[in-house]
Image (tube, helix red, strand yellow):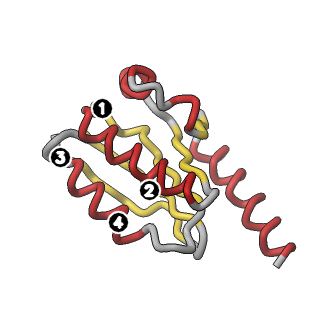
Amino acid sequence: MPLNIKVAQESDEALALMLTGSIDSDTAPELEATLADMVHPQISYVGLNMAGVTFISSAGLRVVFKVLKQMKAREGQLLVTEMSPRVEKGFEIVKMIPDLSIFARHQEMDDYLAVIQQRESDEG
C-alpha cells in the first residue's frame, strides 16, 4: 500500500503531517526525504497524525526514531496522534512509547502546539 503524506500544519517552529497508508521498506524513504526537506533548524515540534497508517515496519520505525532523536537534540518534541493499536504495538515493541508525546486526537495536539507557540511568542 502506498504512503500519502499531507501537510496539516506548518509554522516557523512546528510541522504537522497527516500520514495514510503503510510505512514500510518501500515507503519509508519517501517519509524520510519529506521530513529531511521540511524539518529545518527552527522546527522544534513535529507532529505525525497516524490515523490512516495501517502498518509500520522496522524501516518506518527507524525514520520516526531518527526524527525523535533530532527533536530531542534540539530540545523539541515529536508528537504522535491517533495511532491504531496495531501501529502502537510496533512502537511498544521497540520501546519508543516512553519517549514520544502521544495524543488520542489531532485536536489535542493542535491545542498543545498553540499553547507552546503562544508562550514562546510572549517570551520573545
Comparing labels 2 and 4, the label whose residue is closer to the camera: 4
Crowdedness near tag 3: few (<14), some (14–19) or many (≥20) residues, C-alpha within 10 Å: few
- The residue carrying mark 2 is 17
Q: Report which residue position mark 1 lands on.
A: 54
Mark toward the start of the polypeptide (3 vs 4):
3
Reading the image, the residue beneath label 3 is 2
Q: Amino acid at mark 3?
A: Pro
* Alpha-carbon span between mark 1 and mark 4: 23 Å
Q: Which structural element holds mark 1?
A: strand
Q: Is residue 85 visible?
A: no
Q: Earlier in the sequence, mark 2 or mark 3?
A: 3
Residue at the outermost bottom position: 124
Residue wearing tag 4: 36
At label 4, counting other C-alpha atoms closer than 10 Å, the crowd grade (few under 14, some 14-19, many 20 or more) is: few
Q: Do the CB atoms of the residues marked 3 and 4 lie less than 8 Å apart? A: no
Q: Are marks 2 and 4 in contact (CB under 8 Å)?
A: no
Instruction: Give the CA separation, mark 2 to mark 3.
Output: 16 Å
Give the residue at x 29% y 41%: 60
Q: Are marks 1 and 4 in contact (CB under 8 Å)?
A: no
At label 2, the amino acid type is Leu
Q: Callout 1, which amino acid?
A: Thr
Give the x, y percent position of residue 18: 42, 52
The answer to which of marks 1 and 2 sits earlier in the sequence is 2
Disc 1 or disc 4, which is closer to the eye?
4
Identified at 45% across, 22% down, the residue is 92
Residue depicted at x 47% and y 73%? 40
| Cβ–Cβ under 8 Å for marks 3 and 1 | no
Spatial distance from mark 3 to mark 1, Cα to Cα?
A: 11 Å
Sequence-wise, the earlier of marks 3 and 1 is: 3
Of the residues under marks 2 and 4, which one precedes in the sequence?
Answer: 2
Q: Nearer the viewer, residue 51 or 68?
A: 68
Tell which circle, 1 or 4, labels the residue nearer the N-terminal end: 4
